[in-house]
């Protein structure tokens, strides 16, 4: 007797593969700005949304203009809040009614209880005549200024349109948080019809760039390339050190004139070169409004991984690094300045034929950034594929078959690195025999495959010199 499959036959193929941990074309830009509320820590931006989600005219918006002003389209950006100054404890009314007329109808009947630590006080704003939510905030702040507890408090709308009441309690050492609750009398503004549920956010002390980065990576490890604005020399050197411990890259833009001084030793470029950091690229420019890191994140990183050099690839929205004394005109750096910059492991933007590009593409420690990119990419792909292989098997053992399978995965990605001109052809992979693993090693359940591959990097050419002999 025919079954239902004769008329409707469905097959689902299930493949067990690990979720991608890193997107090599996605960057994180760390800034200290209210466009990223403290409680959110970071916001995802895309080419289609970033202008609507941020405050026009701000430096980080110009940075994103340059990111998405390149010929490629980065999938997204993690715009991240870095707390470079101590913050105030505050209360967020995320679910507040956003219709001003609802508040206006209350006139002077609405109240809420303000709590700071063990102290409380009822606040009674006058909403007579308000026509916008900004007016509502103004009236709350006006009455706070007349109160005992909240005299130094402010009230405003944040970038998301939420009502925020800011205290005068600064930093993490301020023991009290502030809360909005039910008053002793009057119409309860803390209810769902008005200000709604209140979320208390404690104050924070100044944090390092690394802490800001790690707070995001602990939740979402997608971003691969790190950039920042506002860090001091000490802060960016410390940040570079933190990135050096991760499988990430850091692009540092510096306008410090000491970078082009052969005798200066306090600048970030000099210090990073001395530390031999291989995951930081230092870009020197005298144009403070230029964003060469954004250009790289928009033009180099979203391309096929590790195929493009940081050097000699045209970038948009940039000037060559030098700046004339008129403060406007882009000029070439002098030979002495270039020698000093290169000696410090930094790079500069040249424009010999109207095409702006970096000259060398090297990390502070001297390795090519392209090679470092390829290293991290191939590590991630081999890791993913080996893990997927392990998930797909009933069991993986200390056997020649499983070792050979792992070897195939390694060679697959080494071959890809050869194709992308990261590695030279002719690499060797030497895997141990299953019989070489001792009983004690097997008892650990860890197959350690140490130093099984030997490969040379394909080194890029950034300059060609030619000598010709003519007979006359």
Image: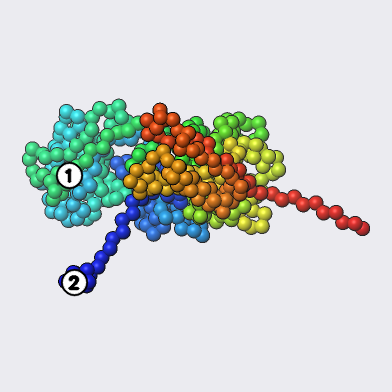
Q: In this rendering, would 137 be left or right of 187?
A: right
Please tell me whether mark 1 sits on a helix, a strand or a loop.
loop
Regarding residue 454, the answer to whether it shows in the image is yes
The colour scheme applied to this rendered structure is rainbow
Across and down, in percent, residue 348 comes to 61, 45
Which quarter of the image is occupied by the C terminus?
A: bottom right
Mark 2 crowd level (few <14, some 14–19, many ≥20, 10 Å Cα):
few
Distance between the alpha carbons at the discs numbered 2 and 1: 60 Å
Q: Which type of secondary structure does the marked residue at label 2 adopt?
A: loop
Residue sitting at x 21%, y 45%: 93
Residue assigned mark 2: 2
Residue indicated by mark 1: 197
The quadrant in which residue 269 appears is: top right
Q: Badge 1: how crowded within 10 Å, few (<14), some, or many (20+)?
A: some
From what the image shows, is residue 130 above or below residue 38? below
Horizontal and vertical percent for residue 328?
A: 59, 51
Badge nearest the viewer, 2 or 1:
2
Q: Position of residue 44 (x, y in %)?
A: 36, 50
Which quadrant would the N terminus be assigned to in this image? bottom left
In this view, the residue in front, 266 or 56, is 266
């Amino acid at each position: 007797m025919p079954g239902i499959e004769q008329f409707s036959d469905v097959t689902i193929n299930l493949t067990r593969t690990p979720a991608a941990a890193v997107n090599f074309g996605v960057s994180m830009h760390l800034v200290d700005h209210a466009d990223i509320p403290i409680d959110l820590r970071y916001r995802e931006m895309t080419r289609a949304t970033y202008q609507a989600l941020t405050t026009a005219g701000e430096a980080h918006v110009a940075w994103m203009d340059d990111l998405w002003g390149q010929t490629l389209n980065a999938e997204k950006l993690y715009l991240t809040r870095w707390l470079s100054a101590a913050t105030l404890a505050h209360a967020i009314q995320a679910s507040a009614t956003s219709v001003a007329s609802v508040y206006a109808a209350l006139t002077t009947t609405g109240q809420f209880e303000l709590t700071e630590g063990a102290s409380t006080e009822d606040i009674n704003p006058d909403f007579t005549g308000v026509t916008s939510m900004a007016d509502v905030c103004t009236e709350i702040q006006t009455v706070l200024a007349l109160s005992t507890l909240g005299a130094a408090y402010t009230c405003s709308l944040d970038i998301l349109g939420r009502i925020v009441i800011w205290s005068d309690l600064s930093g993490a050492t301020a023991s009290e948080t502030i809360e909005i609750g039910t008053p002793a009398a009057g119409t309860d503004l803390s209810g769902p019809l008005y200000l709604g549920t209140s979320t208390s956010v404690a104050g924070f002390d100044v944090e390092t760039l690394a802490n800001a980065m790690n707070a995001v990576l602990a939740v979402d490890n997608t971003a691969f390339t790190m950039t920042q604005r506002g860090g001091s020399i000490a802060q960016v050197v410390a940040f570079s050190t933190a990135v050096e411990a991760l499988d990430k890259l850091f692009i540092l833009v510096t306008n410090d004139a000491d970078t082009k001084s052969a005798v200066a030793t306090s600048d970030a470029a000099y210090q990073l070169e001395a530390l031999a950091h291989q995951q930081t690229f230092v870009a020197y420019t005298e144009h403070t409004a230029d964003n060469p890191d954004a250009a790289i994140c928009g033009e180099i990183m979203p391309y096929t991984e590790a195929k493009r050099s940081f050097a000699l690839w045209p970038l948009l929205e940039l000037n060559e690094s030098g700046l004339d004394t008129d403060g406007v005109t882009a000029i070439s750096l002098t030979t002495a300045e270039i020698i000093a910059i290169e000696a410090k492991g930094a790079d500069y933007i040249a424009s010999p034929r109207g095409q702006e590009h970096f000259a060398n593409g090297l990390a502070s420690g001297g390795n090519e950034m392209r090679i470092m990119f390829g290293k991290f990419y191939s590590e991630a792909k081999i890791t993913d594929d080996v893990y997927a292989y392990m998930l797909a098997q009933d069991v993986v053992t200390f056997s020649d078959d499983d070792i050979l399978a792992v070897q195939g995965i390694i060679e697959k990605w080494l071959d890809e690195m050869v194709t992308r001109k990261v590695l030279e052809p002719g690499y060797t992979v030497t895997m141990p025999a299953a019989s070489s693993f001792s009983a004690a090693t097997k008892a650990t359940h860890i197959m350690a495959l140490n130093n099984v591959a030997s490969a040379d990097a394909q080194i890029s050419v950034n300059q060609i010199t030619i000598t010709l002999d003519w007979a006359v």
